[in-house]
Image: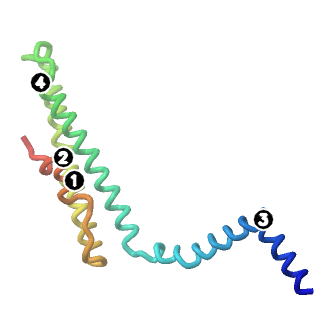
Amino acid sequence: MNTNYIKHLKSFILSPIFPVLLGIIIFILYVIYCTPVSLCDDTLDLKDKLDFEIWKLEDNRLKIDNKKWALSHLDLVTSKNTNGGFIHKKVWSGNLEQLYNNQEILLNNIHYLENSIKKLEPNFSSKLDAAWQFKWGIIAKRN
């Protein structure tokens, strides 16, 4: 009678359903024991917000560079000493000023989020450290 159980166990292990059931069991154990640790992280939402703010800052930096380049390369032949050219430059300069103000707001938001995260996790360092400033240089200076 013992041999009969061993024969059934051997056929079950060699059947194609065994790896599927084993995978499902391992996945369920992983979800039970590993997922709650990441879900209990209080800083996860703050880190997502910080990443989004840094992304917006990078996007704003590219817009500033594009506006500066476009403003410096205005067609001087058609816009020189004309009312339209003056208005055009005034509008673009206003947009550039608005982008600089937006950049200051984003930097304040980023520093606030960093300080909030560092209160909960003291050894935290964000993407806005030396690597980010090395990539784009020092934060945009007004020229």
Most extreme residue toward the bottom is 2
10 Å crowding of disc 4: few (<14), some (14-19), many (20+): few
10 Å crowding of disc 1: few (<14), some (14-19), many (20+): some
How far apart are labels 2 and 3 at the CA level?
Answer: 55 Å
Q: Is residue 140 above or below residue 35?
A: above
**Mark 4 and 1 residues: CB-CB less than 8 Å, in contact?**
no
Viewer-nearest of discs 3 and 1? 3
Q: Is residue 104 above or below residue 74?
A: below
Most extreme residue toward the top is 77
**Mark 2 and 3 residues: CB-CB less than 8 Å, in contact?**
no
What quarter of the picture does the C terminus occupy? top left
Name the residue carrying label 4: 86
Amino acid under label 2? Trp
Residue 74: where, in percent of width, then height?
A: 15, 22
Q: Secondary structure at mark 2?
A: helix
Disc on res. 63: none
How far apart are labels 3 and 1 at the CA level?
Answer: 50 Å
Q: Which residue appears at 27% of the width and 71% of the height? A: 124
Disc on res. 132: 1
**Mark 4 and 2 residues: CB-CB less than 8 Å, in contact?**
no
Residue 49: where, in percent of width, then height?
A: 35, 61
Amino acid under label 4? Phe
Quadrant in the rendering for residue 3: bottom right
- Nearest to N terminus: mark 3 or mark 4: 3
Name the residue carrying label 3: 17
Viewer-nearest of discs 3 and 4? 3
Q: Is residue 125 above or below residue 63?
A: below
Amino acid under label 1? Trp
